[in-house]
Amino acid sequence: MSELRSGTDLVPDARQEGDTVIATVRGEIDLHNSPQLRDALLTVLLKPQPRKIVLNLADVPFMDSSAIAVLVETLQRLRKQGGKLYLTNLQPRVRGLLEIAKLDSIFKLVADEQAAMQDERDS
Amino acid sequence: MTSDTTRNHVSRITNHKSQMADTAQNFAPVPPPADRIELKISSDPANLAPTRHALEQWCRSRGFDSAAADDVGLCLTEALANVMRHAYGGRTDRPIVITAQCPDQTLIVRVRDWGNGIDPESVPPARSDPLEPGGVGMICLRKLMDSVTFTPQPDGMLLTMTRRRDRQTRQT
């Protein structure tokens, strides 16, 4: 396991375990700070070229469409290298936005990090 | 920009009755919730969160449950972000005025800008692929509010959004 430095308080913890990157996202994310999230995800978390990225969103009470766009862009990049993006511990408000945008089916939405790791082993 | 500075950029004006109550807050009971709220901000994205928080808090004070207040807050965020990005082209020093009132059973939120005056609904949605998130903000407005009306002004745009008090939350 190796720790990754995201360079932003929005992603306070990130680590690489094999070909998986696991990160915690924290805070309300809107147009003001979504560029920071984008930098962290696209620059830092994708750099090791993981097969999977697991984002724990337990501490994200709010996201707007600009944050969703960052997640979608991350997913697009990840798919190009054959990877998957897991979102765990979604708060109802964030899950609701994904459902409204009909984007809930393109991400792997799972209960927690353990479920994401288990799914990794099964796939 | 610090959060304190951000808060300073959000000026809140309540109705006359509430202003009087605020002035006398040390000598009077807690004033009733203002029946109207007006927020004047600059088009800096740093103002999005405090403005949303202010409107959500006001909605709750007017008897809307948390889920409904959350929906309204999300719609306001999307509307403001649209103004900041498109109507003002990313400039952070332009004015936006938000008003909200709930005279009976319907919440009315208005967003006034002095930008390019282009009706966002006149721009065809870019989204045909689920991996293309364009237009998510407008989808939120349409799904979470009862009506969304863009009224061109001689010098900008007026967005009016309404939502019934008895509407169920999160109609997906």
Image (spheres, coloured by chain):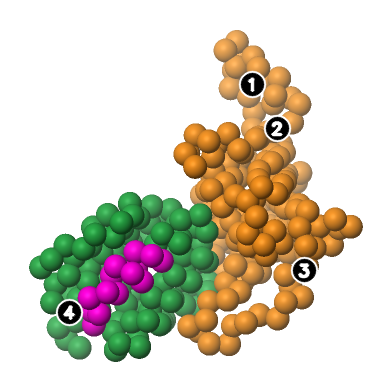
Chain colours: A green, B orange
| Closer to us: A40 or A54 | A40
The residue labelled by disc 2 is B14
Chain for numbered disc 2: B
- From this viewpoint, is residue A113 visible? no
Q: Quadrant of residue A75?
A: bottom left
Marking on residue A19: 4
| 10 Å crowding of disc 1: few (<14), some (14-19), many (20+) | some
> Residue B22 shows which numbered tag?
1
Check if residue A113 falls in the magenta segment: no
Q: Is residue A58 left or right of residue B126?
A: left
The answer to whether mark 4 and mark 3 are in CB contact below 8 A is no
User: Chain for mark 1?
Assistant: B
Does the CB distance between marks 1 and 2 fall below 8 Å? Answer: yes
Q: Do tags 3 and 1 sit on the same chain?
A: yes
Q: What amino acid is found at the position of numbered circle 4 in the picture?
A: Asp
Q: How many marks?
A: 4
Q: List x then y, in percent, for residue A19.
A: 17, 79
* Drawn side of residue A15 relative to residue B77, left or right: left
Image: A112 above or below B96? below
**SS under mark 3:** loop
The answer to whether marks 4 and 3 sit on the same chain is no
The disc at residue B119 is 3
Tell me the residue at 25%/64% (across/down). A23
Residue at horizontal 33 percent and vertical 52 percent from the top: A9
In magenta segment, residue A41: yes
Q: Are marks 1 and 2 on the same chain?
A: yes
Which quadrant of the rendered structure holds the C terminus of chain A? bottom left
Question: Percent from the top left, x then y, of residue B51?
Answer: 59, 45
Task: Please name whichever residue, A96 or A84, is drawn nearer the observer in this view of the structure.
Answer: A84
Q: Residues within 10 Å of mark 3 (few under 14, many from 20)?
A: some
